[in-house]
Amino acid sequence: MKTSKADKYFSLFIRLRDSDENGIGKCCTCSRYGLAKKFHNGHYIKRQHEASRFSEINCNMQCPTCNKWEQGNDVEYRRFLVEKYGEEEILWLELQKYKSHKLGAFELNVIAEKYIKKVNELMKTKNIEKWW
């Protein structure tokens, strides 16, 4: 199993979670509104740190400008996370990048299956049609 299937459905989940029933959401760092299908799943602790790669706290909908061109806009991202979850939770999250953790094929498959189900549930709840 490649990471791509787990990444695909996790990303879809985050963007659906963070958008309304019209598929419109707000960037967590600059507050710009846009279509979830055109926005990104922005990671506060970057993706190469596998211990937090699939953390729902670590990931939020982010516009392409902040995620790509502003390299995540980390100062504003942290401010957003502290406001949403509290300083203590974010300090714990920040420690996760120092954990050595390699995801195996079995773990990635379990993650993919979990988020396929969550995506399908959100699509039904929000009455959003498939856009990928």
Image (spheres, helix red, strand yellow):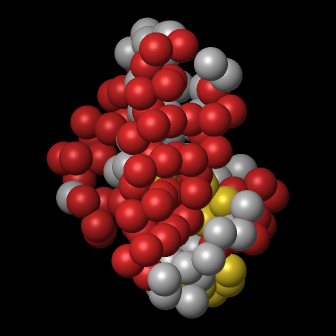
Residue plotted at (77% across, 54% down): 68
- Taking the image as shown, residue 67 lies to the left or right of residue 55, namely right
Q: Is residue 84 left or right of residue 1?
A: left
Q: Quadrant of residue 85?
A: bottom left
Image location (x, y in percent) of residue 67: 69, 57
Q: Nearer the viewer, residue 121 or 13?
A: 121
Closer to us: 121 or 23: 121
Residue at (33% x, 38% y) in the render: 93
Query: Which quadrant of the figure contains the C terminus?
Result: bottom right
Q: Is residue 127 above or below residue 79?
A: below
Residue at x 39%, y 64% (from the top left corner): 121
Residue 131, can we see it? yes
What is the x, y in percent for residue 12?
Answer: 58, 57
Q: Quadrant of residue 42?
A: bottom right
The image shows residue 13, relative to residue 128, as above or below, that is above
Number of labelled discs? 0
x, y percent for residue 99:
39, 15
Q: Is residue 25 left or right of residue 80?
A: right
